[in-house]
Image: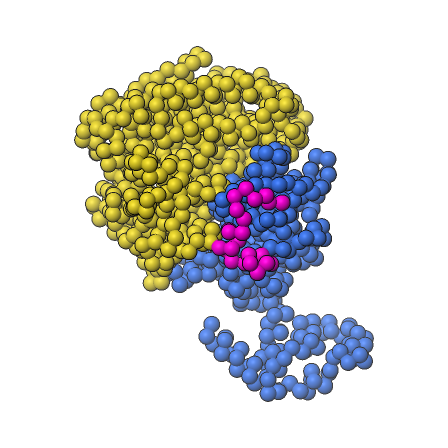
Amino acid sequence: MTSTYSPTQSTPDGRRFGRSDRYDTLAARNLRLTIDDKIAVRIRRANRDDGQIFYQDFQVPYQKWMRVLDALNWIAENEAPDLAYRWFCGSKMCGTCAVRMNGREILACWEAVEPEMTIEPLRNLPVIRDLVVDRIHYENKVAKLEPWIERTERYEHFPEPLTHKQMKEASKALDCISCMCCYSACPVIGLGDLTNFAGPAPLVQLGQTALDPRNSPMKVKRALALTGIFNCISCYKCEEVCPASIPIVSKIIEPLKAKTAQLIPEMAKHSLALRAIIATRGRVDPSALMLRVQGLRVLSKIPRAIRLFARGKIDPIKTFLKIKTEASEAAGRILRRRTATK
Amino acid sequence: MSITHKGYKSPSMQVLTTDVVIVGGGAAGCYAALKLHKNGLKPLIVCKGLVGKSGASIFAGNLVISGHLLNNSDEQASNTAEFLIKYHNQFLIDQRWARRCGEWIEKVYYPELEEAGLYFRRDDVGQIVTSPGKIRSVAANVQGNSGVPFMDLRRKQIIKAGIPWLEETVVTALLRKTDGSVGGVFCLNYITGEFSVVHARAVIMATGYSDRLHARSTGTREMSADGIALAWRVGATLVNMEMQWWHTNDIAHPPSWQRMQVYPNPMLGSEKSARMVNSAGEEFFNQQQDDPLAFGPYTVQLKALAKQVHAGKARYDGGYFAGFDHCDPAEVDNYTTYGKTFRQLGLRFPQQLVETAVTSHYRQGGIDVDTTTMRSSVPGLYVAGGVGGHSNGLIGLATYDGNIVADSIARDFPDLTCGAMLQQDIEVESRRLTQLRQSSSGGMTPVEMKEKIRALMWEKVGVEKDATSLRSALDDIERIRLELLPNMHISNQDKSANYEWLDAIDIVNMMDACELIIHSSLERKESRGPFFRQDFPLTDNDKWLVANVLKKSGNGMRFEQRAYDLPFFKPGFATKDNFEVTW
C-alpha cells in the first residue's frame, strides 16, 4: 500500500539548493525575491488510497521573508486543499515539517523559499501521502536503543554535581528535534537492510544519554551494541543538512565510535586494526588489514589472493617484510600523541 | 482491525479498554500518565499531535525557580509567588493552590526532572546558570529551547514505562455512560482514517491553553480548542474564558513564524533583556528596566504597546521592532537561542532589530475545576494543565496538575465504575464524522473557513474590543455555522492523512469555543490585565475580582460569579484605569 520513496526517483533538477554564488548567504537568500514575485513550486504528490504518484506545479506569490511552509500553506489555502504535509509548531521546535527542497533536506518552517523549488518527501521512510512520511520505523529504532539514563549511583539532591564541560557533547545532541533530515540524507541508511546501521538521528538521540557522564557504562554498552555504528562512513551528509546545526559526525558519532571501541572492541575490530596498521606502517595495507580482521579465515581466500597478486594488486613482500618505514615512525608518533591527550 | 466490545460491531473501529484516558500529550498529560502508572493504574494517552512534540509545552523557554531553590532569597521566593498571582493571573487564581504548587515545584519537580536526566544548563565549573534579578529562571540545556529537551524526556519516560498512546489521533467526542458520567472517548486516527472507541473509568482533559483561534496564535497546528468544546458539550462548567493572554513581540513576517518570540524575559547570565522600539525609533519597553518584577512581562508589554498604538507609533499586527542591539552578541549567544531567528532572516545580529507583532497566546480561563481533586463539574471528567480555568500557564504548573489529577483518580478509583456506554452516541459520532468527510456541496474548503474564523476573531475579539465588536463577531460566527458550514466542500474524500477532514472536524470545535469566549467577554464588564474592553476601561476589583463562571443550562448558558479568596496578595485598590494598573 505505502510507496517507499527511493533515492533513484529524484527529479532531474535536483540539488540546486544554494548553488548560485549570489544566493549562498542567508542575507542573500532572504533578499532575492520581492513581494508578489511568483515562485514556481513543484510538489510530488502521492496518494495512498489509489497509489497514484505525480508532480503538480503551482505559482505562489512571494510574501515577506517567506518560508517553505508558508508556500505550502498558501497552496493548501488557495490551490490544493487536499495537500498533505505535516507540521505543528512553525518555529523549528517540533521537527515534523522536514521535506526535501530541490534535492536537499530542509525544515519547511525554517528555510527561505527559492524562486523555483521542487518539494518532495524525505527519503528512506515510507510515504503515507504527499509529503507525509511514516515516522514509526525511526521511532521504533530510537525506542530500541532505550535512550534514557540508568544511574550507577543514587541521585542525591538538586542540583547534582555536574559541569558543562562534562556535558559538552551530550549538550550538542540535546539540540536534536528528531526532524529526520539527516536520516533522509544518510547514504548508508539509503542502502536499506544491507547494513544494520541505526542511522544518524537515532545515534544523536542515543548520544544525548550515552555521552552523559551520569549514565551507566553497562547501559551505554547495551545500546551501542545495537547501533552498527561502524557502518557510518563519516561522509558528513548528516551534518550538512542538520537544521539544528549539530556537529553530528564530529561531536556525536565519532565520540560514540570511540566509546564503542572502548566498551565493545570486537565491534570496532576493523577500525582498530586499521589504526594499528597505520600506526606501525604509516600507510594502509589491505593485505595486513585482511589478515588482522579475518584471522585464519583468510586461508580460504588464497586462490583470490593469488589472482590479486598476479594482477599486482597486493604485495606480500611489502606486507610481511617492509613494515618499518620513515612514514611509520611519524604516524606512530602522531597516533600515540593523540591517544595520550585523550 | 475488528474487535467486538459490549455488543457493538464495526469493521473499521478499534475498541480499547483502559483505566484512564488522557487527552493530550503535553506536560500535564504526560506527567499524569507517568504518575497514574506509578500509582498502579493503566493510562492511555490520546494525542492529536505527537506526544512531547506538539502542543504548547515545547515552547517553554525558561523554567522559573520557586521557593528557596538554588539559594533564592526570601524576597525572591515571595516575588515569584507575587508574579504568578498578580502579573500572570491578575488575581484570578486560587492563591492557596499557587502556594501548594510552588512548594511542590521546589521539593519534587526539579529533583525529579534532574534525576530522570534533564540537563539544567551549567557553567564550566558546575554552577547552574540563572537569570539574575528579582525572579530567577534556569534553562534545560539552552534558554529559549528548554521545552524541547524537557518534553523529549517526557516522551522517553512514557516509552520507558510502556504506557500506550494513540498519536496523530483526535478525540472527537467524550462518551457517556448510561448514568451520564464520562466513561470514554471517540477518536479518529487521521493518518490511517480509523475510528477508535476507548472505554475508561475516567477521562483527563489535558489539551492545553494555546488554541489557534486568532489570525495570529501561538498554539501548534492541531490546537483548535477541542478540550473546551468537548467538555462543554457534555455539560462541564467553564470559567474566565475571556481572559486571553497575548505575546507582544513575536515575529511579524513570515506568517509561519507568528509564534516565534523575541523573548522579553531576563536572559541567563546577563543583566539585560530584549528591548522594544516603536516606528519612530523610540524605545518603549525593556523588561529589566521597566518592570523587573514582571518576569514574564506580557501584560505590561501589551499595555505599553497599546499606548504606542493609540499614539499611531505601532500596530497590533506590526510596525514596531524588538531585539538585542544594546547587547554584546556573546551575552545573548552564551546561553540562549535568541539570535537564531535574526540570523536566519539574514539580519545582522545583534545590530538589527526585527519587526514584531502581537500574537494570541495562553487563555487563562478554561474548564472549571476543584483544584484539590482536578475534578470538573461532570462526573468522570478530570482536567490537568492549561485547559483548566484555574491558572495561567507555566510548564511547572501544568505538571503539578498532572500530579494532583493522578493522585485524585487513584483515590476515586474504587468508586469509578466501568459501566456500559450509550451505544447510540457511538453510532451518531461515527456517522457525523463520515458525513463531514463526504461534504461536497461546492462551498468553502475547511481551511478557508478556519482562516475566516481566525480573521474575525483577530479583528473583532482581538486585543481591544467592545460590546459592538463582540456582538458583530457572534453574528459572523452564526453566519458561518448556518450558511457556510452546510455548504463546506472537501475535495478529496480519502481516509488516510486527510487534513481537510481534520480541519472540518476542528471548525465545529473552534466555532463553539469562540462563541463561549465572546459571550464570556461580553459578560466581564471591566478591563483587567490583558483583557481590554474599550467600553469598560476600568479595572474594577469591587465587582469583578471574581471568577466569571459559565454554566450550561438546557440548550443555552448562564453566568455566575464566584469570589476569590485573597489570603496572601491583594490588589490594594478598588477601581483604576486598566492602563494605569502596573499588572
- Residue A216 sits above or below residue B108 on the image: below
Asked whether B60 falls inside the magenta stretch, the response is no
Q: Residue at x 67, y 58 (%)?
A: A195
Q: Residue at x 59, y 87 (%)?
A: A326
- Residue A10 sits above or below residue B550 on the image: below
In this orientation, does residue B486 appear? yes
- Residue B191 placement (x, y as % from top left): 61, 36
- Residue B66 placement (x, y as % from top left): 29, 44
Furthest residue to the top? B554
Image position of B274 (left or right of B499): left
Judging depth in this view, the residue of B234 and B493 nearest the camera is B493
- Residue A115 sits above or below residue B238 on the image: below
Judging depth in this view, the residue of A283 and A257 nearest the camera is A283
Chain B in the picture: what colour?
yellow
Judging depth in this view, the residue of B364 and B458 nearest the camera is B458
Image position of B568 (left or right of B499): left
- Residue A180 placement (x, y as % from top left): 57, 50
Q: Residue at x 42, y 56 (%)?
A: B348
- The figure's colour scheme reads by chain
Q: Over which residues does the magenta segment extend?
A: A18-40
Image position of B263 (left or right of A245): left
- Residue B268 sits above or below residue B78 on the image: below
Asked whether A22 falls inside the magenta stretch, the response is yes
In this orientation, does residue B51 appear? no
Chain A in the picture: what colour?
blue
Residue A231 appears in which quarter of the rendering?
bottom right
Image position of B342 (left or right of B526): right
